[in-house]
Amino acid sequence: MEDAYVLQLSDRKFSDLYLCFCGYAKCEPLHSFGPALRSNYLIHYILEGKGHYRTGGKRYDLSAGHGFLIEPGKQIFYEADEKEPWTYLWVGFNGRRAEEYLKDVGLGYGQLVFRSEQGRELKNLVVHMLKNYTISATDQFFLEGSLYMFFSVLARDISLPTVQGHGTENLYIKKALGYIQDNYGHSIRVADIAEYVCINRSYLYTLFRENVGSSPQEYLSNYRLSRAAELLSAKELSMESVAYSCGYRDPAAFGRIFKEKYQMTPLQYRKKYQQEQEEHRKKRKEMPHGI
């Protein structure tokens, strides 16, 4: 990574929402981060160039004007384009009301990418954060205010390109997706999802077919398997641990279901992934990782 500017914070005066770090960088070709997990929320906004973001078994190809949200505890990977590497800014934050505030601007619960035309203003806010940090109370209040202003700018014209649907139906889908993503590791059933959303199974099925393109059961199964595929990249996890972490209490059954989807066993998938990563590392010529 080149031309990188980073502010890392340790003192936290606030609790509802607080800044953990922020930065700005012009990345080199194929600069990447991950696969890894974050302990806080992180928003990247792309100013120039392009790249891709992967999480939850999905890949998002993004360019200038797009942004993406990283949620705590979710495995992610992102990489700059080889020919047109991105320049981006980022803001890391947390707090007891962080999830609520993200929801207010339309992010979270499966909605991880967005578009905004306010790149200049977002960049100016981050630059001012980078230039105005000391341990003084003045700067701590300034940074807190700047973080809220960042949310205000996003809320002004944020465009959300993924989950379809409108009104109450769209809210049901978002709640259902959020429930699945938070509980897929437990032995949940479609009946549990419907009960959480407070609608009957038949209506839930119809909403999923219309807005997601699959049944609730298919989505739950695919989500579990996608997460399993991500976890298989971690060498220290046994096959039994991967299966259990993704809601499968029978490792043998997990192996059969995984093979049906990916046309290979979990062990074969892990070996293939490791080989691809090794080839990728050689291609990047041991380029360093960063934020």
Image (cartoon, rainbow, N blue to C red):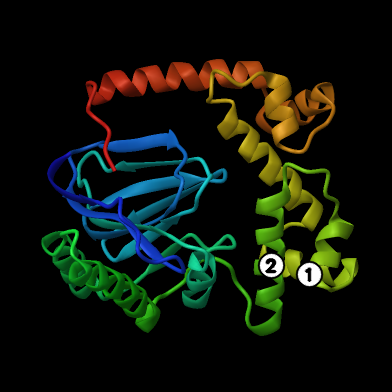
Element type at mark 2: helix
Binning the other alpha carbons within 10 Å of mark 1 as few (below 14), some (14 to 19) or many (20 upward) gives: some
Horizontally, is 73 left or right of 204 in the view? left
Which x, y percent locates residue 253?
Answer: 84, 26
Q: Earlier in the sequence, mark 2 or mark 1?
A: 2
Specify the amino acid type for callout 2: Lys
Q: What residue sits right under mark 2 in the picture? A: 175
Specify the amino acid type for callout 1: Val
Q: Nearer the viewer, residue 47 or 215?
A: 47
Q: What residue sits right under mark 1 in the picture? A: 197
Q: Nearer the viewer, residue 260 or 178?
A: 178
Identify which residue is drawn at 54% across, 71% down: 100
Element type at mark 1: helix
Identify which residue is drawn at 47% across, 40% down: 37
Label 2 to label 1: alpha-carbon separation: 6 Å
Q: Nearer the viewer, residue 56 or 93?
A: 93
